[in-house]
Amino acid sequence: MITVSSLTKSRAQVRVLDDVSLEGAEGTVTALVGPSGSGKSTLLRCLNGLETFDAGQITIAGHRLAAGPHAPGLLERLRRDVGMVFQQFNLFAHLSAAENVALAPRVVLGLSASDARARGLDLLDRVGLRSFADARPATLSGGQQQRVAIARALAMRPRVMLFDEPTSALDPAMAAEVMEVIVELARAGQTMVVVTHDHGFARRAASRVVELAAGRIAREGLAGA
């Protein structure tokens, strides 16, 4: 499902990623851990084509990314199969929670408004927010907004989900809400890669833990090992 081979990326003559290789099988959760600046988020962004790289290659959800610029058509196909949740929620402030979740299925997949809303309501129910379907983002807590963002990413029914420190902007109580949703996704067999500083989450939900340091894999192994 995910294969990263000899991935290398530099910025200003500094190796941000240095010959990184890893694999993630279908239905597994890979936790990327390590200090700030170790290359975790850059690696995640490479997996979704948000960053280009200088050498190596990535195969993810059946799509192959090579070094250098990526064709727009390839990125469009890739992002139908690879969802991403960022540190910031990036919800549309003028849309309700249900409208935020239903937007991509309606616009990108061509679902009818009623079918897209039904999918959105089902996903809001899955993350525990169906009763907030008609609420605007400004009226929701940070944890609730992040759960809407997760539902929005799931609305495209991605084969792989990527999370970039999804709880870093939240207080501990809200972070626990969001992590519980991700743990439930893991139990349901969703293939995921999660950048996190929460080693407790890695032990609970991850299949493998990969530790990066200075752009290289310092160590990796089974979660809890």
Image: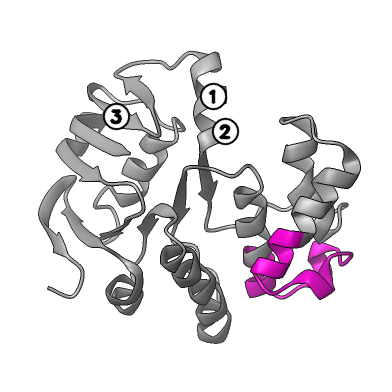
Q: Earlier in the sequence, mark 2 or mark 3?
A: 3
In this rendering, the answer to whether 40 lies above or below 20 is below
Q: Residues within 10 Å of mark 1 (few under 14, many from 20)?
A: few
Cα–Cα span, label 2 and label 3 = 16 Å
User: Is residue 85 rendered magenta in the image?
Assistant: no
Q: Residues within 10 Å of mark 2 (few under 14, many from 20)?
A: many
- Foreground residue, 16 or 161? 161
Q: Is residue 92 visible?
A: no
Question: Residue at 30% across / 39% down in the picture?
Answer: 2
Which quarter of the rendering shows the N terminus? top left
User: Is residue 133 rendered magenta in the image?
Assistant: yes
Boundaries of the magenta span: 122-146
| Picture mark count | 3
Question: Residue at 63% across / 42% down in the picture?
Answer: 156
Which residue carries the number 3 mark?
58
- Mark 2–mark 1 contact, CB under 8 Å? yes
Q: Is residue 18 left or right of residue 24?
A: left
Which numbered circle lies on residue 77? 1
Cα–Cα span, label 3 and label 1 = 15 Å
Measured as percent of width and height from the top left, residue 151 is found at 65, 57
Cα–Cα span, label 2 and label 1 = 5 Å
